Amino acid sequence: MVTKLFFLILLDDNECNRLPSPCRGNAQCVNTPGSFECACPDGYKLGITGRDCADVDECRLLLGICRNGRCRNTVGSFSCECADGYTLTGDGQNCRDINECTELPGTCPAPGKCQNLMGSFVCSCPAGYELMPDGNTCADVNECLVDENLCDEGDCINTQGSFKCECPTGYVLSSDGKKCVDVREELCFNTFRNGGRGSCSDPRTTTMTKTQSEFEKLCPSGAGRGPKGEDLNECSVMPGICEGGECVNTDGSFRCECPMGFVLDSSGVKCVDDNECAVSNICRNGTCTNVEGGFECDCTDGFAPGPMQICEDVDSIFCPFKHGEHERYKKIILSHFREFFQL
């Protein structure tokens, strides 16, 4: 008896070769023994049916992505938008700080000093310089213009980042370099002869400098007094000391008095014109014009300067008249006022 053996060979059916493909859209079909799978490209994931791909929102799923920036989801991918002062990392997934001090040429040029900060930078300037409004460059400060008292008794010369004082002959620079000190030694005189422009006589045998100790030797009783403590009459010793005014000697000192219409300036020895018009409404009913030593009032119609130059009502300065004569004399006098004062 002959026995026949039969073998059943099962061949896999490649579903991926079917049309249409069992995987839809951009899903890729992958054949497996007895079945198939749908695979999605990067940035996608399988949908509910397992046969199509849906976009992955990396901005929601990937924690910490796009640090120092803002994540923007795109179809199948994402992008990072970096804040000012930051740039993308090599993998494009985060933002890193830009070191402006080393990466951006021209940042804080000398003599400025650059300090990097997260997302920014700061420029600092050395003494003698100030930061410009652009926040990036340092400009020289002209100390000679900033401080008018700098280099007293000398000339102030501005330099880059500093200044220097140039002193005239007979002066030396102070230890702090900010003023010139008078070290001149000149003869001191015991007598002043008033006559013409005046002259000094009877010189002392030693010279004196302008120091406190030597001043005390010369004037032991202080300024305004002689060697024996007697009062010095500055008005006689220094004729013309009060410019435009009158000198009045006082015990140990003096004062200047100005004529009417003038006042002393800040020096205390010079009389200058007093601007009376600076006083509010000094003319009352007119316009004030300052003149040397006084003022004038330009009065409005119906007013005329009174005894104190203040504009007064014309009616108030008329003398009383008999009944019925007031208006007639008022017109006559008013016409004379206008003719005299050219009103």
Image (tube, rainbow, N blue to C red):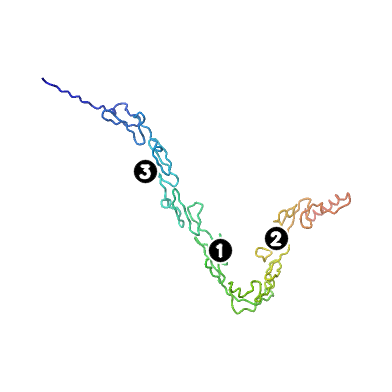
**Counting residues from the N terminus, which is met first, the one under dot 3 or under dot 1?**
3
Amino acid at the residue labelled 2: Asp
Q: Residue 91 — which label?
A: 3
**Residue at (30% x, 30% y) in the render:** 37
Amino acid at the residue labelled 1: Leu
CA–CA distance between discs 3 and 2?
Answer: 80 Å
**Residue at (80% x, 54% y) in the render:** 337
SS at badge 2? loop
**Counting residues from the N terminus, which is met first, the one under dot 2 or under dot 1?**
1
How many numbered discs, if any? 3
Residue 330, image x and y in percent? Answer: 84, 51
Q: Quick check: 333 left or right of 104?
A: right
**For mark 1, does the 10 Å Cα neighbourhood hold few (<14), some (14 to 19), or many (20 or more) residues?**
many
CA–CA distance between discs 3 and 1?
Answer: 60 Å
Residue 313, image x and y in percent? Answer: 79, 52
SS at badge 1? loop
Q: Quarter of the image holding residue 144?
A: bottom right
- Residue assigned mark 1: 150
- Residue assigned mark 2: 274
